[in-house]
Image (cartoon, helix red, strand yellow):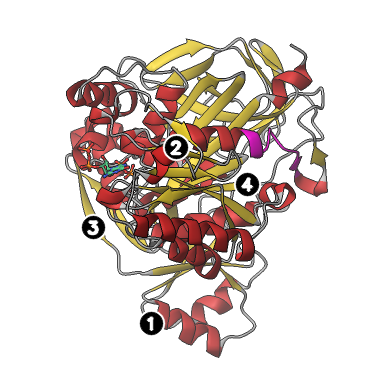
Amino acid sequence: MTPTEEIARRRAFAIISHPDAGKTTLTEKFLLYGGAVQLAGSVTARKDQRTATSDWMELEKKRGISISSTVLQFDYQGYRINLLDTPGHKDFSEDTYRVLTAVDGVVMVIDAGKGIEAQTRKLFEICRRRGVPIFTFMNKLDRPTRDPMELMDELETVLGIQAYAMNWPLGTGSDFAGVYDRGGKQAHFFERTAGGAYRAPETIHDLGAPAVRARFSDETYARVAEELETLEIAGSEFDQEKVLAGQLTPVLFGSASNNFGVQLLLDSFLAHSSPPRSRVAAGGRVVEPTEPAFSGFVFKIQANMDPRHRDRIAFVRVCSGKFTREMAVTHAQSGKRVRLNSSHKLFGRERETVDEAYPGDVIGLVGHAGFGIGDTLTEDPAIVYDEIPRFAPEVFAYIHSQSTSQFKRFREGLDQLLQEGVVQGLKVADSMRQTPLLAAVGPLQFEVVQYRLESEYGAGTRLENAPWGMMRWVAPDTDTEALGGALPSGSALATDADEQPVVLFPSEWAMGYFQRQNKAVELSATPFQKAR
Ligand code: G4P
């Protein structure tokens, strides 16, 4: 296969959702359809399998949430799919944001009984800003749902994206008979699959066929026929260009736990989503995936993923050229030449050496202590990708080692976790403390720090809450001495890990007050771009 063909068959995407909408279930079902996992015929076996493939962190099991993203690669109908799993909890949004910088499309899962929820909205905004294709899966159709027309309207009014129903539910809840595929003009009947362990058998019929009519009451049939007519007359038109630009979302209905509608979703996604796209690097340089020079960027770093290999992995999204093991590249941030010899593909706990990779793929590189999040690796030193945005933390705490004898391990672990970006580390001006102030978007991030220090470094810790509730970056050329004098009481000056000045405020109110009084001071919820 030529490099161009390799690129064309690749898809890199993520699933986003509010917790509990069905992201994990859908991920599993994609893997099932891709033949990447063999799920046995019982619920118990399915749960075992789930443990084996995604629960590699104890805390994940304990909290029932996915904390660290995994990258799953599988083949389906000639496509090579890289599915980047995003943590679903709102407290981990920074990690999620980073993953979303590495994908070319997303599937947004919505619980059709609930509609758009807070987290869906937040994540959607990030994806929209990147202008990538967004597909919508309305899940849990086997249960009573909200009116499908209303759900479509909500996408347009709440999220402000045009929506096109690729298929349409035939009844809901106990009345749910299946979906009508508008493109194929056929009804796909729903059959519950015990435990959702097998591919759903789908029987396909024309809508007017007696077998279809017999499935539901005259009333339901009439309503569905009317809804379909309304969609034809008043609904959005399908427009592939708009899909690629992230302006129109194809909508598919189904039930992930019953495997129903999953294949239609996967087929539709593969047909209408985008292969790896060009990327704009620093200085406006457009990097095409087909360029011969290899380039990629680190979007995630994690240490100790597997107790059997206690090491640090930098996950790199390949953006152009071809990666080959042992190749020498430039690490843009240090200017050093490095040889990439320990490259892996990960599937849950399993590792496999990767000899080559193409744009759209993700590789895990082991043993490069100097790599940081957002760093560029490239054969063409003119390519430097922009930094991955950071977000203003809202919770702050100091962390202490519980015993002096563990202090060394504690410090080593904390440095590692700060480098991974699990939380941000700040230095408060005039502080005599030995450890940085920890800053996070949500308190659960602190729990992860404590948990990992204990389980990976054997260091027990104690948290001490700090009295701030809001942080803003100030322009690097600000006169910080004068600024310090003007701050309201309870506020403090600090510097972030890149030595950029920040202000800590006790509350949003205090920040607003300060800003009204000091209009000339430029505050930002994201860091100011560093001069290169
Ligand atoms: P998340 O990753 O988005 O947080 O959601 P997850 O897949 O874990 O699903 C949340 C719950 O919703 C799970 O139930 C799951 O089985 C259920 N679910 C997913 N898809 C469907 C569907 O199509 N129909 C129905 N009725 N339920 C669905 P749970 O009780 O928390 O877990 P489990 O014991 O079923 O695994």
Amino acid beneath label 1 = Ser
Please state the horizontal and vertical placement of residue 131, each as a whole percent of the image.
66, 52
Amino acid beneath label 4 = Pro
- The residue identified by callout 2 is 188
The residue shown at (63%, 55%) is: 248
Query: Tag 1: Cα neighbours inside 10 Å, few (<14), some, or many (≥20)?
Result: few
Name the magenta segment's main secondary structure.
Answer: loop
Tell which residue pokes out farthest to the front in this image. Answer: 210
Start-end of magenta stretch: 271-281
Q: In whole angstroms, how far apart are the C-alphas of marks 3 and 4?
A: 43 Å
Q: Quadrant of ligand 1?
A: top left
Where on the picture, by quarter, is residue 11?
top right
Amino acid beneath label 2 = His
Q: Is mark 3 within 8 Å of ligand 1?
A: no
- Secondary structure of residue under mark 4: loop
Please state the horizontal and vertical placement of residue 253, each as a whole percent of the image.
44, 47
Closer to the eye: label 2 or 3: 2
Closer to the eye: label 3 or 4: 4
Counting residues from the N terminus, which is met first, the one under dot 2 or under dot 3?
2
- The residue identified by callout 4 is 133
Please state the horizontal and vertical placement of residue 343, each as a whole percent of the image.
55, 16
Q: In whole angstroms, how far apart are the C-alphas of marks 2 and 3?
A: 56 Å
Counting residues from the N terminus, which is met first, the one under dot 1 or under dot 2?
2
- The one nearer the camera, 174 or 465, is 174
Closer to the eye: label 4 or 2: 2
Amino acid beneath label 3 = Glu
Which mark identifies residue 326? Answer: none
Query: Tag 2: Cα neighbours inside 10 Å, few (<14), some, or many (≥20)?
Result: many
Residue 417 lies, with reference to residue 499, above or below; the image says above
Closer to the eye: label 1 or 2: 2
Q: Is residue 274 magenta?
A: yes
Residue 532 in sight: no
